[in-house]
Amino acid sequence: MASKPKTPVAEIATPSVVDGILQTFVDALAAEEGMAEVAARLRATVVEERSYTEASLRTALFDADGS
């Protein structure tokens, strides 16, 4: 059974509470010195792509070059 593709948060008329918390967290992280790149990768992963697997989160947090 194929899973239904997830709709990016930006396309949702009324984001959920969880979406709002994630967006707020990523915004706060981006405001911290030296964390802008990590925040951008994390935003792309959890907010835009809505991917929450260990591998995708590990890459977003620790792997700047995606390898």
Image (cartoon, grey):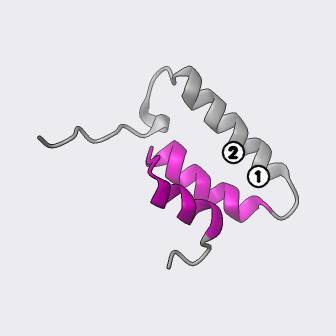
Residue at 76 percent across and 52 percent down: it is: 30
Residue 5, given in percent of the width and then of the height, sits at: 27, 42
Residue 59, given in percent of the width and then of the height, sits at: 54, 65
Say the numbered circle drawn on residue 26.
2
Residue 14 falls left or right of residue 41: left
Residue 9, given in percent of the width and then of the height, sits at: 48, 36
Q: Residue furthest right?
A: 33
Magenta span covers which residues?
35-62
Check contact, mark 2 vs mark 1: CB within 8 A: yes
Q: Is residue 45 above or below residue 28?
A: below
Q: Which amino acid, by three-letter code, is at mark 2?
A: Val
Residue bearing the label numbered 1: 30
The image quadrant of residue 21 is: top right
Residue 35 falls left or right of residue 14: right
Q: Give how far apart the Cα atoms at labels 2 and 1 are.
A: 6 Å
Query: Residue 19 magenta-drawn?
Result: no
Residue at 34 percent across and 39 percent down: it is: 6
Q: Secondary structure at mark 2?
A: helix
Count neighbours of disc 2 (C-alpha within 10 A) and say few if under 14, some if 14 to 19, many if 20 or more. Answer: many
Q: Is residue 1 above or below residue 29?
A: above
Q: Is residue 40 above or below residue 20?
A: below
Residue at 52 percent across and 22 percent down: it is: 16
Query: Residue 38 magenta-drawn?
Result: yes
Residue 11 falls left or right of residue 59: left
Q: Residue furthest left?
A: 1
Q: Which amino acid, by three-letter code, is at mark 1?
A: Ala
Front one among 15 and 3: 3
